Amino acid sequence: MTMRQLGLSIYPDHSDFEADKKYLQLGHKYGFTRIFMSMLEVTGTVEETIAKYQKIIDVANGLGYQVIIDVAPHIFSQLGISYNDLKFFADLGVAGIRLDQGFDGNTEAMISYNPYGLIIELNMSNNVDYLNNIISFQANEPFIYGCHNFYPQVGTGLPYDFFMECNERFRKFGIHTAAFVASQVGEIGPWNVNDGLPTLEMDRRLPIEVQAKHLFATNMIDDVIIGNAYASEEELKAVGNIDRYQVQFNIDFVSKVSDIEKTIVLEPQHFRRGDMNELVIRSTMPRVTYKDVPNTPHDNTETFERGDVLVGNDDFGIYKNELQIVLEPHQESRKNKVGRIKPEELVLLDFIKPWSKFNFKA
């Protein structure tokens, strides 16, 4: 597992240099460190293309971004580049190239030994033996990365189970991975259809930070990249503020929540008990830490629903001040409802396994 990065996408053939530059500066402010740059279309001469891309790549490198450029075979033909010599890309200053379409396995393995140390990023969105084939040709594995596709047309993104099967193939070799989330306001992509540019169809209309949390929560994706440009500053800030290494739930507190209950929710490092059950996720350390602090019953007579956050009250004996997240509806007067996880984040509950770490943000 490598350190997790946040990324932006830019499309120099469809955008303006000054707008791209401003976007990269804004992303840098909020902790974005990677660029997906599309070169699937070339509209000018070779010289014009080099000048246009070089200009924005220099800006990105100056801000400390890792730039990986997306290329297809026809681009090599258009620009007169050979796969046997990647100097063109090294001269541009990119960190690597993403092969939108694959070759025979041996070709990918050979170019992973390019003398420039360029990363060779593979398309992850196919559940076939493609990667095994490349590795069997003794590829230079540290320089092999994986990155999913994005899907501009609504309804065409990957289903979750298929996505995970594709991921397993790359995770088996410990290969660095990436996938895309969709800005809800960005209008620029590589094509003239743009219903958002996510990898996962189920994430398409979710708030962008929830999409990012979802991808990271799978423990299959190292880098989360915003597929469409330009995400708003609010979106960049929201994604930049997430915890990339554990699930962080946004909670809406009930009006009667007490100070001790807020402390129990927001202060400790929570983890799910190893001996799990299907009714609730239990975080039991707060009942030890705060065993002597009173907790008067309130909001304890309703039926608790999935995503409700509960704390044991004074009537619960040894379980007083234990924190629980509801998985199955039930009633229990010895527990206080203190808040509720935001509805769009309920999907994240599935990733809280025995011993999983998690926390809350109000």
Image (tube, rainbow, N blue to C red):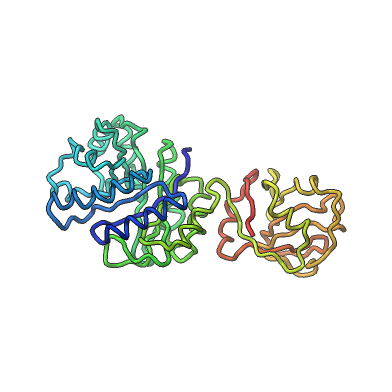
Q: Is residue 193 above or below residue 28?
A: below
Quadrant position of the C terminus in the picture: bottom right
Relative side of 99 to 44, left or right: right
Residue 343 image position (x, y, % from top left): 59, 66
Q: Nearer the viewer, residue 64 or 222?
A: 64
- Residue at 13% x, 49% y: name it: 47
Residue 145 image position (x, y, % from top left): 36, 40
Residue 132 image position (x, y, % from top left): 34, 37
Residue 179 image position (x, y, % from top left): 40, 51
- Residue at 80% x, 66% y: name it: 300
Q: Is residue 343 above or below residue 117?
A: below
Q: Is residue 33 above or below residue 348?
A: above
- Residue at 23% x, 54% y: name it: 40
Relative side of 182 to 362, left or right: left
Q: How many marks?
A: 0
- Residue at 58% x, 54% y: name it: 350
Q: Nearer the viewer, residue 66 or 245?
A: 66
Where residue 348 sits, quadrant-wise, is bottom right
Relative side of 344 to 251, left or right: left
